[in-house]
Image (cartoon, rainbow, N blue to C red):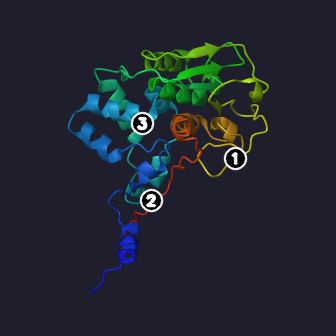
């Protein structure tokens, strides 16, 4: 009997093997809960913390400010109450013995990226790209980093987290420098993260790729795009992937992360 490839392709579309659980799909960072929770259960707090750190970039900031979309997505809430993942995330920080970030021994890249804005979205993008050893320059119009975090957290908490995560990385920080025209910047790629009501430089979304604008090599996201602080942080981390793809291929077509899952809850 002849087997048509199309038949198997249709079946693969319905495969659930790699579908994320509800909480992971709802998480702005797509934290791998199926990997994270078992590590906590067996007392592997260092390993669990590493999983959390690799997902969120700034663990202390996220564990303090996360709006917990996973709670609303959790099917457990129909039985008694949603699983308190935020509490478990805090436990991974509190009980881990080593909070130092990863130290990647990579050769320096010859590409230069400008980040406009030293709020949490811009810093998150900087963290990811500098860890890949790209040359990153951050322009901040005020005299301090952190942006809206100053209105949300105790400075000693978020500044300590930022300092810790950048302890092995190098980047150029230029304070008190407001950028008014992107065309005057000579860089291989740009990420605009000027915050809520910040300068958008007339950029429009290019829906062919995540965080892409209508201007070649220019990406934008964060609170400038209407996100909250935690979502803005996630934007910065994910925008770094889109920028790296562009630097390697010349294409601004990084796939958008989906907050959906094909998994369904069976109802009695």
User: Can the viewer see residue 110?
Assistant: yes
At x 48%, y 15%, the residue is 163
Disc on res. 205: 1
Instruction: Please state which of residues 174 and 187 is positioned toward the viewer in this rendering.
Output: 187
Q: Upstream in the sequence, badge 3 or badge 1?
A: 3
* Residue 151 in view (yes/no): no
Percent coordinates x, y for residue 219 in the rendering: 64, 37
| Label 2, label 3: how far apart the Cα atoms are | 19 Å
Disc 2, SS? loop
Determine the residue positioned at 53% across, 34% down.
240
Relative vertical location of residue 106 with respect to residue 16 in this rendering, above or below: above
Tally the marks: 3
Residue placed farthest to the bottom in the image?
A: 1
Q: Is residue 265 above or below residue 7?
A: above
Res 55 label: 3
Q: Please determine whether, in this image, residue 266 is positioned above or below residue 159.
A: below
Q: Residue at x 23, y 33 (%)?
A: 44
Q: Secondary structure at mark 1?
A: loop
Residue mark closest to the camera, 1 vs 2: 1
Observer-nearest of 173 and 71: 173
Q: Quadrant of the N terminus?
A: bottom left
Relative to residue 246, is residue 53 drawn left or right?
left
**Image position of 95 (left or right of 136):** left
Q: Is residue 76 left or right of residue 220?
A: left
Q: Residues within 10 Å of mark 1 (few under 14, many from 20)?
A: some
Whichever of labels 1 and 2 marks the residue nearer the N terminus, that label is 1
């Amino acid at each position: 009997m002849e087997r048509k490839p199309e038949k198997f392709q249709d079946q693969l579309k319905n495969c659930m093997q790699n579908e994320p659980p509800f909480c992971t799909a709802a998480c702005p960072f797509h934290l791998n809960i199926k990997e994270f929770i078992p590590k906590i259960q067996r007392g592997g707090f260092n390993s669990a913390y590493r999983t959390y750190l690799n997902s969120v970039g700034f663990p202390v900031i996220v564990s303090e400010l996360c709006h917990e979309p996973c709670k609303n997505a959790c099917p457990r809430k129909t039985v008694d109450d949603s699983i308190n993942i935020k509490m478990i995330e805090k436990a991974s920080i509190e009980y881990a013995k080593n909070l130092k970030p990863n130290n990647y021994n990579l050769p320096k890249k010859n590409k230069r990226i400008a980040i406009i804005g030293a709020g949490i979205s811009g810093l998150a993008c900087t963290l990811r790209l500098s860890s890949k050893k790209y040359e990153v320059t951050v322009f901040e119009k005020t005299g301090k980093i952190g942006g809206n975090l100053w209105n949300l957290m105790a400075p000693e908490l978020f500044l300590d987290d930022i300092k810790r995560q950048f302890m092995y990385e190098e980047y150029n920080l230029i304070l008190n420098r407001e950028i008014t025209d992107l065309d005057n910047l000579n860089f291989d790629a740009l990420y605009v993260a000027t915050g809520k009501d910040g300068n958008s430089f007339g950029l429009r979304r290019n829906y062919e790729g995540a965080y892409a604008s209508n201007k070649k090599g220019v990406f934008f996201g964060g609170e400038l795009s209407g996100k909250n602080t935690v979502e803005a942080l996630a934007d910065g981390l994910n925008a770094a992937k889109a920028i790296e793809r562009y630097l390697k291929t010349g294409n601004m077509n990084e796939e958008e992360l989906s907050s959906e899952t094909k998994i369904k809850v069976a109802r009695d």
